[in-house]
Image (cartoon, helix red, strand yellow):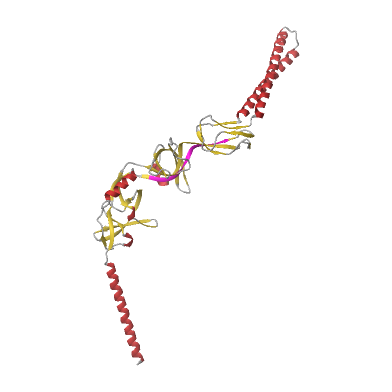
Amino acid sequence: MKRRTIGIAGLTLLALSATILLSAGCGKKSAGDKAVNVIVQAAENRKVRPYIESTGTLNPNEEIIMGAEIDGIVRNVKVDEGTVVTKGMLLAMLDDTEHVHEVIRAKAALKQTEASLANTRMEFSRKDALYKEQLVTRQQYDDVFTRLTLAESEVDRARAALVIANQKLAKTRLYAPTACRVKEKKVSVGDFVKNGTPMLVLIQPVPLKLRFSVPERDIGKMKVGQEVHVRVDAFPGREFVGKVSIVFPSVEEKTRSLTVEALIPNGQDELKPGLFAKVRLYTGEEQDTVLVPVTSLLYEGERVRLYVVEGTTARERPVKLGNKHGEFMEISSGLRAGEMVVVAGQQNLSEGAKVSVEKPAGQERGKEGTGHNEERK
């Protein structure tokens, strides 16, 4: 009786398991047959210019640190941060009392030595005439000649001292070496400064220098004189055009990139040093390129893929990307123009899945295309 009960229970459990498995199999088949709703758009063939993008920072064309050349007390500072100065303009002054007196002393010493030299020359002239007539000894003649030589040396020394005194006096005044703008004032009236102490920092903002880097693979596309198109957040929608001035001779080993420097005109003084800049360099003429909306792309690490629709079936395509143009992305390989690309609903797709296209392909092509052209210009 016990064995019979166990057998009936086992058969009942086996039948129940078979029913569950059959139901699960039918459910999976039904779900697999269900079409996924998607929106598609045709991959377009357009003419676009190849370019390289980078980022950099605007820097002044020149930055000059004006330092004290002698020790002294600051008597006057005639500029402040932001002051526009012209070449030769007086910027600051040190106390010059001691140096004025030194110049006066040097001038007096020079006059004294010149007077002594004049007297010695007159004496030498007389002794020279007498020596020729053999009325004075050779020793007397040599003595006056020696004193003449020493008097000439004293005059030269006094003149050099006067030059040095005048130079020190001149160094009590700082003049602008070029047309520029004051970036920073480091001293105030009454400060004591030593030789070499920075007093003012000047910058030359016209033109500005822009340094940026390009990947190793694009080095061959760089050349001096190439146009650089620059955008900054401070002026949205505007583009500033400069030219490459320096292509550095070596590649940075850590980043495997090459540093490039460009000069950006700044005649209106709108751009400021320190601004972050987005850089674009066009590397060729317009060429035919396959473009798809950026919304169609799926990223998995370094792998990029999208789905195309063939009839009612979704096909997965790994693709390689080029440059971004507004809301569109270049496809350098893996896709042909005219193929129907899924732009919405692709997250629910897998290879071979059935799809139902909700909207006709290319219905917003005109609108999208206009935005792209504006970006490209």
Q: Quadrant of residue 285?
A: top left
Residue extent of the magenta highlight: 52-66
Horizontal and vertical percent position of residue 13: 33, 82
Horizontal and vertical percent position of residue 286: 31, 42
Which residue of the protein is positioned furthest toward the top in this rendering? 133
Q: Is residue 57 magenta?
A: yes
Q: Is residue 214 visible?
A: no
The C terminus is located in which quarter?
top left
Q: For the point 65% across and 22% down, which residue is it?
A: 159
State the residue in front, 187 or 69: 187
Is 143 on the left or on the right of 58, as rendered? right
- Magenta-colored segment: predominant secondary structure: strand
The N terminus is located in which quarter?
bottom left
Q: Is residue 129 above or below residue 284?
A: above
Is 43 on the left or on the right of 177, as rendered? left
Is 26 on the left or on the right of 187, as rendered? left
Q: For the point 36% across and 44% down, which residue is it?
A: 51
Q: Is residue 88 above or below residue 361?
A: above
Q: Is residue 157 magenta?
A: no
Horizontal and vertical percent position of residue 185: 56, 38
Q: Quadrant of residue 11?
A: bottom left
